[in-house]
Image (spheres, coloured by chain):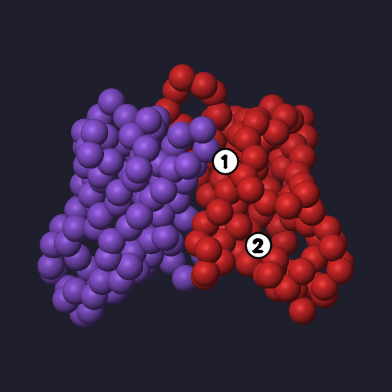
């Protein structure tokens, strides 16, 4: 069974810092990997999707990478802002979608 | 393009009752997946419907069931509610076709509280 782990569980950084969130998975036979953010009590907002044949995707200040062979993905956030404060989740698509437990990010003004 | 809608947004029920939640996917999407989110267990997959057929199922008891209509709208039913069913129930919409990449889009969720 696919296991998805996100480290750290919580992260607090001052505004303006660059940061990296990590996602690891145990089964490399995936179709895609998707990063989401979730604000408290809300649904998930899709940030980036990386197909299994791709190595990275970029959107604005966000860059996500994928290394299937090592079972790892990273989400890089440049020049963090207080509005980036949220929980970030990664999900891998195999026969179903498997989610990590998330990283709770707080950006301090 | 309208996003994924879920109704109702909040529900309060008592143990033993049953509840039905509704999800309308993005226009043109044929797949709807349901998830349960709790602080202790995180996001857990319930089931996926594609073209009115259940395509995948997670590891939940038979009290949790669903269906999909010809317009791709989906409903999820929980019978004989237990306190542990209190959670945020999320549905996700995607195109759903095989051999293409599938990006999931989530609704705002239904917050179910069981007393």
Q: Which mark is residue B110?
A: 2
* Residue B10 can be seen in this image: no
Determine whether B10 is above or below A5 in the image: below
x, y percentage for residue B60? 68, 51
Marks 1/2: CA distance?
Answer: 15 Å
Q: Which mark is residue B93?
A: 1
Chain ID, purple in image: A
How crowded pointer 2 is (Cα within 10 Å; few <14, some 14-19, many 20+) is rated as: many
Left or right, A96 with reference to B113: left
x, y percentage for residue B66? 75, 44
- Say what secondary structure mark 2 lies in: strand
- Say what secondary structure mark 1 lies in: strand
Mark 2 — on which chain does it sit? B
For the point 72% across and 29% down, which residue is it? B53
Determine whether A30 is above or below A89 in the image: above
How crowded pointer 1 is (Cα within 10 Å; few <14, some 14-19, many 20+) is rated as: many
Q: Which hue is chain B drawn in?
A: red
Left or right, B95 with reference to B66: left
Image quadrant in which the C terminus of chain A is located: bottom left
For the point 41% across and 48% down, which residue is it? A3
Tally of numbered tags: 2
x, y percentage for residue B8? 72, 61
Left or right, A37 with reference to A11: right
For the point 41% across and 54% down, which residue is it? A100
Mark 1 — on which chain does it sit? B
């Amino acid at each position: 069974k696919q296991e998805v782990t996100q480290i750290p569980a919580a992260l607090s950084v001052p505004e303006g810092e660059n940061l990296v969130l990590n996602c690891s998975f145990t089964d490399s036979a995936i179709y895609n990997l998707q990063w989401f953010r979730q604000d408290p009590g809300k649904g998930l907002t899709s940030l980036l999707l990386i197909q299994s044949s791709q190595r990275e995707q970029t959107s604005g200040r966000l860059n996500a990478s994928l290394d299937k062979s090592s079972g790892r993905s990273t989400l890089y956030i440049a020049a963090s802002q207080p509005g980036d404060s949220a929980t970030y989740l990664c999900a891998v698509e195999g026969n179903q979608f498997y989610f990590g437990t998330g990283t709770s990010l707080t950006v301090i003004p | 393009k309208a996003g994924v809608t879920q109704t109702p947004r909040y529900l309060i029920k008592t143990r033993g009752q049953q509840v039905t939640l509704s999800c309308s996917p993005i226009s043109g999407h044929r797949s709807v997946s349901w998830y349960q989110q709790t602080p202790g267990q995180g996001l857990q997959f319930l089931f996926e419907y594609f073209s009115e057929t259940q395509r995948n199922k997670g590891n939940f008891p038979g009290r949790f069931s669903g269906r999909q209509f010809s317009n791709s709208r989906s409903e999820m039913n929980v019978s004989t509610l237990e306190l542990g069913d209190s959670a945020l129930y999320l549905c996700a919409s995607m195109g759903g076709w095989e051999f293409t990449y599938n990006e999931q889009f989530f609704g705002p969720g239904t917050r179910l509280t069981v007393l």
